[in-house]
Image (cartoon, rainbow, N blue to C red):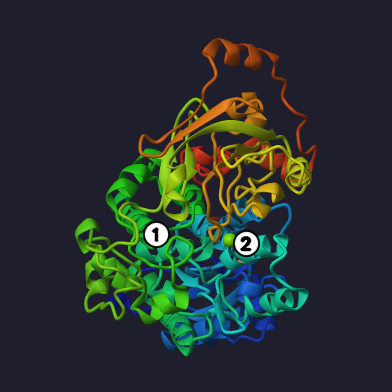
Amino acid sequence: MAQDPTKGSTKLRSDRWFAPDDLRSFGHRSRMMQLGYSEEDFRGKPIIGILNTWSEMNSCHGHFRERAQDVKRGVAQAGGFAVEMPSLSVDESFTKPTSMLYRNMLAMETEEMIRSHPFDGVVLMGGCDKTTPGLVMGAITAGIPMIYLPAGPMLRGHYAGRILGSGSDAWKYWDERRAGNISDEEWLGIQGGIARSVGTCMTMGTASTMTAITDAMGLTLPGASSIPAADAGHQRMSSACGRRIVEMVHEELTPDRIITDAAVRNAAVTAMATGCSTNAVVHLIAMARRAGVEFTLDDLDALGRTTPLIANVRPSGKDYLMEDFFYAGGLRALMKQLEERLDLSCLTVTGKSLGENLEGAVVYNDDVIRPLSNPVYHEGSLALLRGNLCPDGAVIKPAACDPKYYVHEGPALVFDSYPEMKAAIDDETLEVTPDHVLVLRNAGPQGGPGMPEWGMLPIPKALIKQGHRDMLRISDARMSGTSYGACVLHVAPESYVGGPLALLKTGDIVRLDVPARRLDMLVSEEELEARRAAWTPPEPRFQRGYGWMFSKHVLQADKGCDFDFLERGFGPAAGEPDI
Ligand code: FES
Ligand code: MG
């Protein structure tokens, strides 16, 4: 075999498919020739799978077909052989009821496609929210060398001299439209200007959060997550991924060497400093658990209490978007500010340590990437709550809500379904005050189903007309990373499986205390016991198919919503194919 023994690799995994002089390998080689390749093209070379989540229904990945060609160029330059393989696209914009229902499907697909094919290494192409955790979770379990290629944020939105931020400005201007302040013509202009290039949402939403986490964990080329999708540097980064993955195969640089306890903590610290999406909680925990790292809500909260938010990027920051963040130095510059809080010895896909990757990183605009002495918010962006409403935890993003809600007591206004809530909030005669606490239940992993991003419950029209734009809201749903407001999310256990949220009644007093990290209903234990005895479980959402499997096996939010049977430790790992 044409292998360079000085590069450390003694045997390629793909040899199992192509090297033996037997009938099966004859078949594999002959089918490669059917694809138009000569033996010289692929024999003895690292075979790199490019797992591409391109789809015409994924507006954020519109550049991925071209980028896959850049990756191939890099792979060939480094002496490898690349094959592109389509992967479930899990687009955020169109998938109903929610893309979260399919994150685990992508994770399963990724794991199985890697395991069953002759790949020595993989480049994972993703970016739109769930694609990042889905691809990474599956690839962690598959265990061969991998590098993550983030789609990159889109350019700033623009309309009529105004800068527009993904999601955040959609919610903001929608409220203004409901208040009668925006014309049809303006609305159409905003619609056309808010997403004006390829790439992922350019606020610090879930996409930018998750690619930053992957970058901080050492799974992307350093700083790759900040490069705008439309920048020529994104193409150069793509071909560099191709070159590097071939070297990683020779170095046998597998994900278990990168995703350690310390790497997960580095990712969490970085996420907190960026003003991360609340979705980071679910996905980071799921990714960590796949890697065998026990990382909990309490770990996140502890890091959140001590990590200042220094990225002045919306929605947690006030003024800027991801394009500004890139020009200000990007994630490397942000992480450079955090050096004392990071474990710089962590190994990364470059084969170098995190500390080496951060050498020379500079902040070019210290209003966008703040020094620790002048943070946007003195704590990290998330706080984890517990109490008799959420014994297994709930999440709030204090940096993105009005501080007057940090300690709040008010009567609950409870809805059992999204349609019921929507009809009520649009009713201008609804009896509601700014002190009320809006509650939506049956919106968790099983109830939603799939834990949809419904958690930023709309403010009732009656209050909008009075000029109110925020109020305390509670649900077992998630919310978009671009959302904001006093929204308590991810209540666990969810109401659909009988969590205490199921026992709350309209009129009960709810108390939130963010400094004390508490969320409680002020209802006696005897009364709750009586309500619990009277509670009957709702009908299952699905009777067949993927949804049935999802409902049977999805874990609660505090465990990352992975399937129980995909978790590390569920059973012995599948061996390599031996036939
Ligand atoms: Fe794809 Fe926001 S819709 S990243
Ligand atoms: Mg999103």
The image shows residue 521, relative to residue 363, as above or below, that is above
Q: How many marks?
A: 2
In the displayed structure, does residue 56 sit left or right of residue 161?
A: right
The image shows residue 116, relative to residue 332, as above or below, that is above
Q: Which residue is mark 2?
A: 171
Residue 61 image offset from top left, x and y in percent: 61, 74
Q: Quadrant of the C terminus?
A: bottom right
Mark sitting on residue 255: 1
Q: Residue furthest front?
A: 466
**Residue found 77% across the figure and 39% down from its top:** 542
Q: Residues within 10 Å of mark 1 (few under 14, many from 20)?
A: many
Which of the pair 55/17 is nearer the observer?
55
Which of the pair 257/333 is nearer the observer?
333
The image shows residue 61, relative to residue 467, as above or below, that is below
**Residue found 69% across the figure and 43% down from its top:** 449
**Residue found 50% across the figure and 48% down from its top:** 282
The image shows residue 398, relative to residue 518, as above or below, that is below
Mark sitting on residue 273: none
